[in-house]
Image (tube, rainbow, N blue to C red):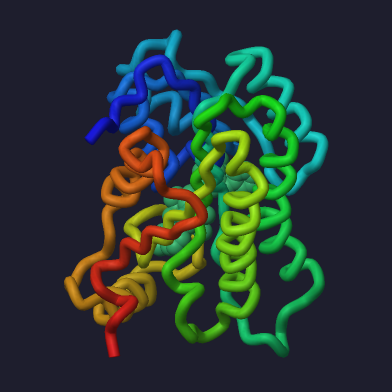
Amino acid sequence: MIMHLENKTALITGGTSGIGLATAKLFLQNGANVIIAGQETAKARKELADYDDKNKHFFIYDTAKMKDIEQLGIFVKDTFSKLDIAFLNAGVARFAPLETISESFFNEVMNINFKGAFFTLQNLSKLFSENASVVLTASAGMHKAHWGSSIYSASKAALRSLAISLSNEWVNRGIRVNVVSPGTTDTTLLQKLGLEGEKFQEMKNNLIAQIPMGRLIKPEEIANAVLYLASSGSESQTGTEIIIDGGAFFKV
Ligand SMILES: NC(=O)c1ccc[n+]([C@@H]2O[C@H](COP(=O)([O-])OP(=O)(O)OC[C@H]3O[C@@H](n4cnc5c(N)ncnc54)[C@H](OP(=O)(O)O)[C@@H]3O)[C@@H](O)[C@H]2O)c1
């Protein structure tokens, strides 16, 4: 199976930590030229210090801001002129029961998780090469009933739906669009849920208890699936979803 990305150009949004950063490393190891986009690039610059400067580029952007999305499109064009791989992965997780959800909570999650990816893709559309591959990060959780997940899961289900629509819309251009859906993955996203100390450990233990394999997923394990979807190894695959969740999907 061909998973090399030599001479391929790639954009990773949310590439500054967690799953996106693990994917940036894997893409660089496999020969790609990568733009890493996010709001705070210092940690990624440090973690990717060993990789050749000519293969890595950083762009600070807030995916919820249309102006930033436009600027990202210009940066991609100026840096690469043609884009072979787009991994749209920037996202936040917020959980609350429906009765307490304000318009600003709704807008924050939908704007970052769905609207940002939608308009980033619109901006990139004319830059995609023939045989380009788009991968969107949804969530295994969107398939299940979880407390407080109405908006988060809806934002991820919207991405899943977008991949199905675009797989058809872009098939004649040779552009593939697929989804990776992580289960609970050991990244800073969990720390950002606002619990500390014992409460954080308790939450983590509860999450692990829902995973038949008895452990969290590693960001590198999601990155492996993204590499597969991004590469020609998956060239007949479009509109599909890969769920990586340690067996939680079929847990009764
Ligand atoms: N971890 C899990 O259990 C899990 C499960 C299912 C799905 N996911 C999804 O996986 C994706 C990656 O999350 P992760 O687990 O790797 O968590 P993470 O370490 O918190 O990474 C989230 C990434 O999204 C970026 N981001 C957040 N808000 C942004 C904004 N407004 N504009 C631009 N970038 C923004 C962050 O960049 P900055 O920090 O630079 O802003 C960061 O690079 C997300 O879409 C998440 O919903 C995660």
Residue drawn at the location 51% of the way across and 27% of the way down? 84
Q: Is residue 22 visible?
A: no
Q: 49 left or right of 213?
A: right
Drawn side of residue 66 relative to residue 228, left or right? right
Q: Quadrant of the N terminus?
A: top left
Q: Nearer the viewer, residue 112 or 84?
A: 84
Say above or below: 150 vs 39. Answer: below
Front residue of 23 and 249: 249
Residue 75, image quadrant: top right
Q: Is residue 118 above or below residue 207?
A: above
Displayed quadrant of residue 223: top left
- Residue 229 spot, x, y in % from top left: 39, 43
Horizontal relation, residue 70 to residue 40: left or right: right
Residue drawn at 50 percent across, 37 percent down: 133
**Numbered marks: total:** 0
Residue furthest front as drawn: 172
Q: Residue furthest left?
A: 213
Residue at the spot 73% in from the left edge and 56% down from the top edge: 111
On the question of residue 35 being in view, the answer is yes
Q: Position of residue 58 (x, y in %)?
A: 55, 23
Q: Which image quarter holds the C terminus?
A: bottom left
Q: Position of residue 46 (x, y in %)?
A: 39, 25
State the image coordinates of residue 29 (x, y, percent, origin top left): 28, 24
Q: Is residue 108 above or below residue 52?
A: below
Residue at the image position 56 percent from the left and 27 percent from the top:
130
Can you name the residue that lies furthest to the top here? 54
